[in-house]
Each structure stands twice: as structure tokens, then as C-alpha cells.
Amino acid sequence: AMFEKKELAVEPTLKFLGMFNIRFVRSDIKKQLLEHPDYPSLLSISDILKRLGFYNTVAKVEKNKLLQIPTPYLAHAKSNSNKSEIWIVEQIKVNGITYCSGNSIFTVSNEKFLEKCDGVILVGEPAVDAGETDYIKKRMVEVIQNLRLPFFLAFIGLLIALSFANAYAYAPI
């Protein structure tokens, strides 16, 4: 599907977010993107993702390095008709690369992929509590879990230490 410039970065962003366990409101993301001064660049997507707690960076990398980057990531590319597109790179294998463009998924040879991409990419990882809704509630749960965890680990450590101590106490000399 061909996208107007106004839609160029919206669908890839929504799909990319959907690949991670992040709760978001589609219309909010679309509105934030379209209002961004750098839209439809990867920088505009980067800013919106950061607002959601999705740590990311936009970088220009040497083309041959594109095959070594952990997927999924976003890549700036040129379509067959030489239009700017944002692809979601989903899988990199020796025999080809699978990416999502518009509503379609394609697999092309590594050569063809490298020919179409200019090396500008967005890579990232969501924070544990990334997303728009229930942020405070989730954050509180996380804080409580973090408080509980060290005590639990200390308890397990103590049990292990005691079992070793007992084993040695009764070991025949």
C-alpha cells in the first residue's frame, strides 16, 4: 500500500509498538506524530517512543552493519518508485531479510535490502513499565516487588548456607 506523506510514519510506529508489550492509544500516538515538527522522520518516531518509556536511539550505520543489528528495528528506505519509506526489519537470515512495509510483509535478498536502505535506523528497548496507562499503579507494584525480592533472595541464600553447614557437620572424617 502506498502511504501519503501524512501517513508515512504512523503505521510503522503503531506496528512497531505492537511488537512489544506496550499499552498505547493509537489515536494519541498518531496525533503526537503528526504534530511533531520533525515528522515523518525517524527522529519524530524516536521522540514519541521516548515519551512512552521506550528507550531508543536513531543512528546512521554502515550499510553492511545493518545485517548485524538485533531485530526488530526501524529502517529508512526507498521504495521501488524511489519514495521514502519506513520499514520494520523483522528477521535477518543468511538467505534474506524479512521486513514490513505498509500492510505487507516482504522477504528480499540481503543485497536488495542493502541497496534500498540508507543506513538510518531506530533501535530500542522498552522499559519494564513502558506505556501510557496505569503507569503509576505499575510503578508502585514494581517498587514493592523490588523491596520484596532482596529479602526473598537473602532467605534462599540462608537456606542454602544452612544445608551446606549441616552437610559438613555430619560428614565423616
Image (tube, rainbow, N blue to C red):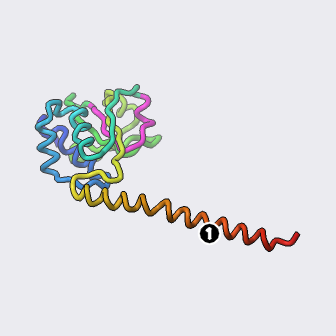
Front in this rendered view, residue 70 or 162: 162
Residue 73 coordinates in the image, percent (x, y): 34, 41
Residue 136 coordinates in the image, percent (x, y): 25, 56
Q: Is residue 63 left or right of residue 5?
A: right
Residue 97 coordinates in the image, percent (x, y): 38, 41
Identity of the residue drawn at 43% across and 29% down: 64
Identity of the residue drawn at 11% across and 37% down: 35
Above or below 156: residue 41: above
On the rendered image, what quadrant is the N terminus found in?
top left
Front in this rendered view, residue 64 or 36: 36
View extreme (right): residue: 173
Identity of the residue drawn at 25% across and 46% down: 52
Specify start and end residues of the magenta stretch as a single range: 64-77
Residue 38 coordinates in the image, percent (x, y): 17, 30
Front in this rendered view, residue 86 or 59: 59
Front in this rendered view, residue 96 or 37: 37
Q: Is residue 91 left or right of residue 161?
A: left
On the rendered image, what quadrant is the C terminus found in?
bottom right
What residue is disc 1 on?
Answer: 159
Using a 10 Å C-alpha cutoff, classify the residue at mark 1 as few (fewer than 14 neighbours), some (14 to 19) or many (20 or more): few
Above or below 19: residue 110: above
Above or below 99: residue 59: above
